[in-house]
Image (spheres, grey):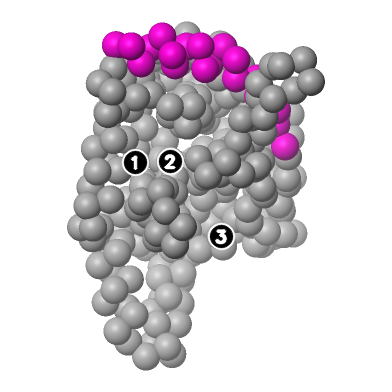
């Protein structure tokens, strides 16, 4: 609102339509675009089989790790999808932040945990990324509370009307760009992309809404491995996308970049170059 935020810079986009859209559609779910994407995974599964021979058995690289890696690379190379609308203006996020959900234990009724991490595919290797994720999961599954968990626990001790009032203050602060960076970095809903792996419980992908709270403009769901009539294997990714952040063609090519890297997994080993000013 005041042209400054602790987590982003204002996009000086000369396109009048892009600047006008937040006023036509002020909510993310007013601008929701849904798309299914088929991704062949035969090469990825063979890649994992060979790569994991060199990995500790308790820390294998999984298909979801490749999905996370490809997503981080796509958002880095295609920064136009690393944006969000807040206060009627378009913002370019500082850094690539992915949030993903996981079960505390692989058992029915086990609570979900959310992991948020800054990804740096321009400098960290695939193995470094995988090990960092295992470390994050170990912390999350240990039962120790994150900053976000502690904040929610404190708020839930308050009466309902007071919780609503505090959330209203937080929304207002976010609207005007007044939230501190420490609060934003700890909150899983302030992310480039929120991802879920329904394939881990052998479910197909499904579309998810975008939360109005926070700044996540994209939600992606990876489904189970499916076998075609010819014996080939694929997954379906379901994407929910705030179309105010970029045009359809740019977004399509961004998702195609993600798909091509999973289908050619050797590309995920290397780091990527940061793009110049767009």
Badge 1 local density, few (<14 within 10 Å), some, or many (20+)? some
Q: Using the rendered view, name the quadrant where residue 224 is placed.
A: top right
- Residue 33 drawn at (x, y percent): 73, 46
Residue under label 1:
117
The residue that appears at 71% across and 53% down in the rendered structure is 31
The CA distance from mark 3 to mark 1 is 18 Å
> Residue drawn 47% across and 19% down?
275
Closer-to-camera residue (133/86): 133
Pointer 2 residue: 98
Q: Is residue 238 visible?
A: yes
Judging from the image, what secondary structure is the residue with disc 1 in?
Answer: strand
For the image shown, how many numbered marks are present on the structure? 3
Give whichever of 143, 185 is nearer the camera: 143
Q: Earlier in the sequence, mark 3 or mark 1?
A: 1
- The magenta region covers 36-54
Q: Disc 2, disc 1: CB below 8 Å? A: yes
Name the spot of residue 262 as percent of width and height, x first: 55, 19
Closer to the N terminus: mark 3 or mark 2? 2
On the image, the x and y values in percent for residue 13 come to 61, 38
Determine crowd level at label 3: few under 14, some 14-19, many 20+ residues with C-alpha closer than 10 A: some
Gap in angstroms between the C-alphas marked 3 and 2: 15 Å
Q: Is residue 274 above or below residue 223?
A: above
Relative to 58, residue 141 above or below: below
Callout 2: SS: strand
Is residue 121 within the magenta segment?
no
Q: Are marks 3 and 1 in contact (CB under 8 Å)?
A: no
User: For the point 61% across and 44% down, which residue is it?
Assistant: 203
Q: Residues within 10 Å of mark 2 (few under 14, many from 20)?
A: many
Q: According to the image, label 3 marks what residue?
A: 211
SS assignment for the magenta stretch, majority = helix
Going from N to C along the chain, the mark reached first, 2 or 1, is 2
Q: Quadrant of residue 270?
A: top left
């Amino acid at each position: 609102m005041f042209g400054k935020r602790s987590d982003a810079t204002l996009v000086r986009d000369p396109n009048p339509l892009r600047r006008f859209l937040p006023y036509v559609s002020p909510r993310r779910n007013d601008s929701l675009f849904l798309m299914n994407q088929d991704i062949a995974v035969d090469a990825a599964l063979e890649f994992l089989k060979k790569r994991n021979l060199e990995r500790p058995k308790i820390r294998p690289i999984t298909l979801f790790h490749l999905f996370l890696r490809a997503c981080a690379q796509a958002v880095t190379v295609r920064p136009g999808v690393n944006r969000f609308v807040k206060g009627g203006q378009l913002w370019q996020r500082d850094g690539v932040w992915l949030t993903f959900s996981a079960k505390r234990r692989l058992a029915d009724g086990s609570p979900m945990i959310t992991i948020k991490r800054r990804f740096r595919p321009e400098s960290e290797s695939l193995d470094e990324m995988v090990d960092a994720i295992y470390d994050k999961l170990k912390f999350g599954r240990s039962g120790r509370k994150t900053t976000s968990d502690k904040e929610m626990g404190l708020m839930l001790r308050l009466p309902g009307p007071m919780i609503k009032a505090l959330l209203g203050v937080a929304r207002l602060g976010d609207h005007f760009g007044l939230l501190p960076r420490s609060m934003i970095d700890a909150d899983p809903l302030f992310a480039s992309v929120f991802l879920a792996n329904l394939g881990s419980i052998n479910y197909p992908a499904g579309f998810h809404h975008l939360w109005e709270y926070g700044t996540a403009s994209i939600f992606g769901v990876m489904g189970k491995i499916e076998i075609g009539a010819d014996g080939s294997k694929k997954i379906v990714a379901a994407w929910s996308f705030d179309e105010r952040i970029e045009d359809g063609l740019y977004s399509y090519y961004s998702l195609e970049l993600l798909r091509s890297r999973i289908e050619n997994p050797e590309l995920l080993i290397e780091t990527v170059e940061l793009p110049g000013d767009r």
